[in-house]
Structures are given as structure tokens and as C-alpha cells.
Amino acid sequence: KGATLGYRRPQAACLTHPKREIMKFLSGAIFLSVTLLFHSGTSLAVDPSDVRQPITLNPQEYSFLLSEIRGHLDAIGAAQQAISTGDLETARKAMLDRGTGRVKFPLPGRPPSFGHKTTDAWRAMAGAMHKSFDEVAEGIANKESAAQIMGRTAKLMSYCAGCHASYRLVAAP
């Protein structure tokens, strides 16, 4: 009967597993981040209704920032994959790799001019995001419930969404 179409395992075996709940949440969070990433890039014509603050970057700065953003998404994906296999230590390390311990200067690959292009508000948001990576790692280390880890991850993702909603990248002339 297990090989027939429409077979379902008992509800208790498939809906209450905390790792599955975390996976569902993180999958949605990653989808949201990637969607926001693709809708926040540069374009040839600026939409006059786009009220996001422009951040004008040269090609090296632009490449650096996109690499950082992809690294954040990769860390969330790595943590998601690790949690799905029960490897909580790898998940914790993936989050810590993007936490406040990572933000040491000079950051490898960071153009010296990059810091002058960002605002105090942007730096505050970025700092809070890195702290939030630490908080997710802490929740994983403390073996918090799926709901608690999802809550911490939702807070982390709110910084990603907030940044993409507040800023737009512009190619330097």
C-alpha cells in the first residue's frame, strides 16, 4: 500500500517533527529572500515611484555587496540543509559564520571605498542582521523548539526584507 498513489503516513509521524517545521519555514524564508534580491537590483531606468534610498556603487563595490548577500543566503541554506539531516552543529556553525564574529576589519575582499557609500542607518541594520545570525545559532545550540528557531529566523529575515525595501543599488556612472 505504501507504493500506491495517495498513500499517507499517519499524521503524528509527519506533521509534528520539529525539523520538518523548521525546513518548511526556512524554505519559505529563502524563497522570499531570493525574490527580494532579484527585485532590488539595478535597472537602466529608475522608476519614479521607487522611493528606496539609492546606494551608488562602482563595479568592485557592487560585486562585493552581491557576494556578501549571496553568502548570507548560502548560510541560511546550509543551516536549513544541516537541520534537515539532524546536523545541528553544522547548522549552528553556518549561522555563526555570518554573525558578528565575521564582521572584522578589514573584511576580505571589501573595497576600501565601500564604507563611505553606506549610511549610518544601513550600517545599523547590517549590524543587527549579523547579531540576528548569532541569535539563530544560539537557539540551535540551546536546542530550542522549532517554533523558537523559526521565530529567530523570521527576525533575521526581517532585516533582509527591510534592507531590500529601504535601499536600491545604483551603478556608478
Image (spheres, rainbow, N blue to C red):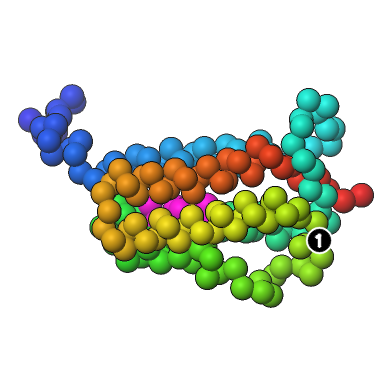
User: Would residue 4 appear left or right of 106 to someone viewing this image?
Assistant: left
Instruction: Provide the residue span drawn in magenta.
Output: 72-80
Left or right placement of residue 128 versus residue 168 in this view:
left
- Residue 157: in sight, yes or no? yes
Instruction: Point out residue 147 in the picture as x, y percentages from the top left corner.
Output: 30, 43
Mark 1 falls on what kind of element? Answer: helix
Q: Quadrant of the N terminus?
A: top left
Q: Position of residue 62 (x, y in %)?
A: 75, 55
Q: Nearer the viewer, residue 11 or 156?
A: 156
Q: At x 13% / y 39%, what residue is drawn?
A: 13
Q: Residues within 10 Å of mark 1 (few under 14, many from 20)?
A: few
Residue denoted by label 1: 116
Question: Which residue shows up at 18% across the image and 26% down it?
Answer: 5
Q: Position of residue 60 (x, y in %)?
A: 78, 61
Residue 162 placement, left or right of 172: left
Choose top left, top right, bottom left or bottom right for residue 6: top left
Residue 126 as seen in the image, left or right of residue 151: right
Determine the residue positioned at 76% across, 30% down: 50
The amino acid at mark 1 is His
Asked if one can make out residue 75 in the rendered structure from this viewpoint, the answer is no
Q: Residue at x 77, y 62 (%)?
A: 114
- The quadrant holding residue 38 is top right
Instruction: Name which quarter of the figure residue 130 lies in.
Output: bottom right
| Secondary structure mainly formed by the magenta segment | helix
Q: Residue furthest right?
A: 173
Nearest the eye: 148 or 13: 148
Residue in the foreground of this view, choosing between 156 and 21:
156
